[in-house]
Amino acid sequence: MARSPDTTRKLNRLAGSTLAGLISLVQRTSSHVYEPQDALERLRADHPLILAVWHGQFMLSSGFRPAPDVKVSAMVARHGDAELVGAAMERFGVELIRGAGAGGRRKDRGGVHALRQAVRYLKDGYSVVMTADVPPGPARRAGIGIVTIARLSGRPIVPCAAASSRFRSLDTWSRMTINLPGSKIAYVAGDPIWVPHDAGETELEYARQKLEQALNAATKRAYQIVGADLGRATPLSLVDPDAPPAEPGFRLKAYRTAMSLLRPVAPLILKMRERSGKEDPRRRGERLGLAGIARPQGVVCWVHAASVGETNAVLPVIEALGNARPDLNFILTTGTVTSAGLAERRLGPNAVHQYVPLDAPEYAARFLEHWQPDLAVFTESEIWPSLILETSARKIPIALVNARLSHRSRRRWQRNKSMAVPLFSRFSVVLAQNERMALGFSVLGARNVSAVGNLKIDAPPPPIDLNELERLKTALDGRPVFAAASTHDGEEESIAVAHRALARHFEGLCTIIAPRHPERGTALAEMLKNLGFTVAQRSLGTLPGPRTEIYIADTIGELGTLYALAPVAFIGGSLVDRGGQNPIEAVRHGAAVLTGPHWQNFRDAYRTLLRHDGAVEVKSSADIAAAVSRLLDSPAEMQRMRAGATQALGTLSGALDKTVEALLRYLPDERLKRAS
């Protein structure tokens, strides 16, 4: 049962009072050192000022108050732990400025209002205490907002740091420290930083960098004075990339033990999956780490992708790496039968496919001992603990490309930091799809993280079978066509209702439904027949006849042909909350894209398409019918939408080149390898 706002406020006040009591206890029972010795006098002389601290050391900022009569305000966000901190600050007679803390996100949580309030408080004679790094990070990277406040107010920023000899650090993005009683506390204040009122972008950036450097220097000095380990208070995102990875804890060891104990039943599990077509019985050994073929000579790059979508994204990487390094050999592992078929059709002569072994330490070791890869490349969110730990133990560099971290996955990993940090700290490089995901990986312990974009944007469109395209065009004989691709259970009914409405306006309309899981085709056909539709099923070898209303394309690898056939395509997994499917494939083939409201798995692509009017969001069968009708009725509207989509793609591309450039750094030179 959700708490009422009144109950939440009472709990925050209680927690804030407790926190304020702890801070007071720490200050009363600890010895204090100021550097310089007259730091408080200097702060009073510059009052009102902007007192800048790093977020992780915010708890001791009250120690910089020159005197009780000095008016102080503090900038505190309206969410998360900031509510508790704000309640504690109020206990010290500090006025609160609320609403900052959106970080790099598009959502405005009141930052503009907070900036104006801060300027007003400074002009009214209050000093403003604020963190220079903006929640939710990146940690210890000063934001531009604080220097903007200094420019608008004409008051200086004073970089300050506080450290205690006894503390506990929390596993938060900023590594928030909880100071303990009976400590030695150091307060270090840097020189004031003044920002000219007419400062331009270059001067503001210079001031921001100067503040960042000064805060880091002050923080380092504070921990030196009290003799404490700064590393314990350093955010995971700032740990030296060359430092040893975190050691596996109890949970990871327990997982590996459990996977080892399950080995006797692994063949039985695989046999059950084979009966339902989810495994290839001829290649069962590969799932147990037994190689199907010999290792090629020379440098081997191992690439792992989960299924068809990830395979499509990473195949261009394999091709581009092969062009840059003709000596390279590739092994591509996947976990599904459909992706194995795709790999067989599209891999070049220097690449082979194997099924990924089950994630038991023994199977992983057997696989690695045979293939001895020089570089391991995992895609998106493929985090298999035994494979990662066994690869790292052999000093093989590991990369995570097109790295994706959903909000749900990030929360799950954060609840299991003892598993996350030992795994993510073993990646040599993480190439994330966007800045938000890059920050998430950093918080989870990844060291060398960059946001390079989504590989699926740069991937070539799915191929068109020209012979089949002509056969379908002949069968349809000029009838209007609408496609619904990658649909999930619960969406086809809405598509069928939309078809019925559209058919009243477009005589002879044929709607093509390509379910995300082709094995649903027969059940889907029966459902639609029961609703009174004339249905044909592609997996049975039939083409749409003159009276076919809905054509079910329940086959594999034909989306390119369908997108080339249909001028408008609804992309599934978005009317129901499945996170959506990749819209770029349809855009590349010139189809106008419709999507439901649930497109969070492809957030960057859809946001950009919608911003450029290159896609239409629909929420019901009525919305679908209206959008399709408008587009089929207006060639000009269709062309405008295609132009917007093309423009959107231009702003999103570039991930492939950046990914290849990064991976090449981790591949050994063939001549050096032979010499060794």
Image: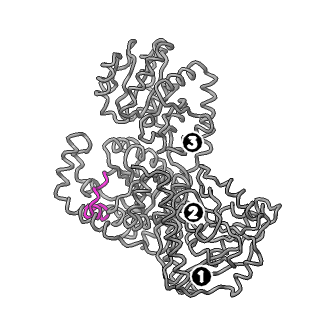
Q: Does label 3 or label 1 sit earlier along the sequence?
A: 1
Residue placed under numbered mark 3 in the picture: 607
Residue bearing mark 2:
138
Residue 406: in sight, yes or no?
A: no
- 52 up-or-down from 78: above or below: below
Q: In this picture, which residue range is highlighted in magenta?
A: 355-369
Residue 44, located in which quarter of the rendered image? Answer: bottom right
Graded by Cα atoms within 10 Å as few (under 14), some (14 to 19) or many (20 or more), the crowding at tag 3 reads some
Q: CA distance from mark 3 to mark 1?
A: 44 Å
The stretch drawn in magenta includes residue 368: yes
The local secondary structure at tag 1 comes to: helix
Q: Residue at x 71, y 69 (%)?
A: 127
Residue 12 in the magenta stretch? The answer is no
User: What amino acid is at disc 2?
Assistant: Pro
Q: Secondary structure at mark 3?
A: helix
Within 10 Å of disc 1 (Cα), the crowding (few <14, some 14-19, many 20+) is many
Q: CA distance from mark 1 to mark 2?
A: 22 Å
Tell me if mark 2 has few (under 14), some (14-19) or many (20+) residues whose alpha carbon lies within 10 angstroms of its own: many
Rendered position, 106 above or below 530: below
For the point 69% across and 61% down, the residue is 144
Contact, mark 1 vs mark 2 (Cβ under 8 Å): no
Q: Which numbered marker is on residue 222?
A: 1
State the quadrant of the C terminus: bottom left
Q: Amino acid at mark 3?
A: Arg
Q: CA distance from mark 2 to mark 3?
A: 22 Å
Report x, y in % for residue 416. Answer: 38, 63
